[in-house]
Image (cartoon, rainbow, N blue to C red):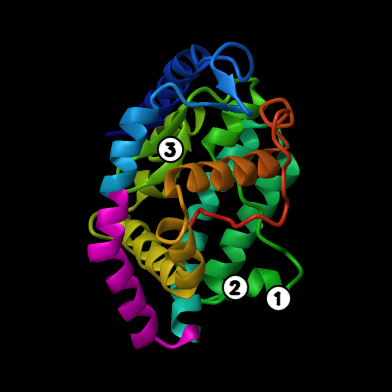
Amino acid sequence: MPLFTRMCRVALLCVVSLSVAACAVPDSGPGVVDGVYDPYEDRNRRVHRFNRNLDRNIVRPAAIGYSAALPDEVEDSIGHFAANLGEPSVAVNSLLQGDLRGAGVSTVRFLTNSTIGLLGFFDAATELKLPPHDTDFGETLFVWGVGEGAYLELPVLGPSTSRNTVGKVVDLFTNPLTYVLDSPEAYYGTIAGVAAGLGTRGRFSDTVDSILYDSADSYAQARLIYLQNRRFKLGDNQSAQAQEIDPFALDTRGF
């Protein structure tokens, strides 16, 4: 399929996604309790139990074994490789947000790490005073004025919101590399991302375990931490008006 046709489909998907996300429930008003709109709590709790069982029986043992088997330097290199393959998507979302500087930083980081950093296994850009700039289509929707919507827990992927779920779907198509790389190279980023996620789960095992297995209500705890961190990252003060945002709360992106 020609690149232009693919990009037109991505643009159409963005428009449709924006329309769907715009129908999300407002961030405040009836049904919002303590800054959280969770109309699907029963369903979310069932998914949370599934995710906990999946973590206990598969993800946690695999992550601990992965971290134990690989030196920290190798884990870091795999994480750098995965992050580098995601830089073009960050650049696209930065452009969609009108952030030309962020788009430029991500582009330069990708070129630098792909060459000097040996395909991204080494973060040469940071060493050259170009720190990473992270964003996604969920943040793009926030910049466009789309509300947070309902809290959701997704199978395998974990905590999310209506807005961020739409963002996750669109982000599958916003990375230009997926249109220029052939199979199997097109899947290297996904494989590296899964490996990096296992590494994060293994490194922060004690902290994650305390939330999932030591909390009186692990669902409510994970929901609170996720929303606090996501809102703080976005500067989403409207959604957080009923919550006290802790900028030092745990970053739960790794589980």
Residue 22 location in percent, x, y?
52, 14
Instruction: Of the two numbered discs 2 and 3 on the same chain, state the one appearing first in sequence.
Output: 2
In the image: residue 210, left or right of residue 90: left
Residue shown at the point (46%, 23%) measured from the top left: 14
In depth, the one of 64 and 122 nearer the eye is 64
Residue shown at the point (58%, 76%) measured from the top left: 116
Q: Nearer the viewer, mark 3 or mark 1?
A: 3
Q: Are marks 2 and 1 in contact (CB under 8 Å)?
A: yes
Residue 122 location in percent, x, y?
55, 77
In depth, the one of 244 and 236 nearer the eye is 244
Q: Which residue is mark 3?
A: 168
Residue 38 location in percent, x, y?
47, 26
Q: Give above or below for 20 relative to 46.
A: above
Amino acid identity at mark 1: Glu
Residue shown at the point (50%, 77%) measured from the top left: 76
> Residue 160: which disc?
none
Q: Give the CA separation, mark 2 to mark 1.
A: 7 Å
Q: Which residue is mark 2?
A: 123
In the image: residue 14, left or right of residue 154: right
Instruction: Of the two numbered discs 3 and 1 on the same chain, state the one appearing first in sequence.
Output: 1
- Secondary structure type for disc 3: helix
Q: Nearer the viewer, mark 2 or mark 3?
A: 3
Based on the displayed image, in which of its 4 quarters is residue 117 positioned?
A: bottom right
In depth, the one of 133 and 194 nearer the eye is 194
Q: Which residue is mark 1?
A: 127
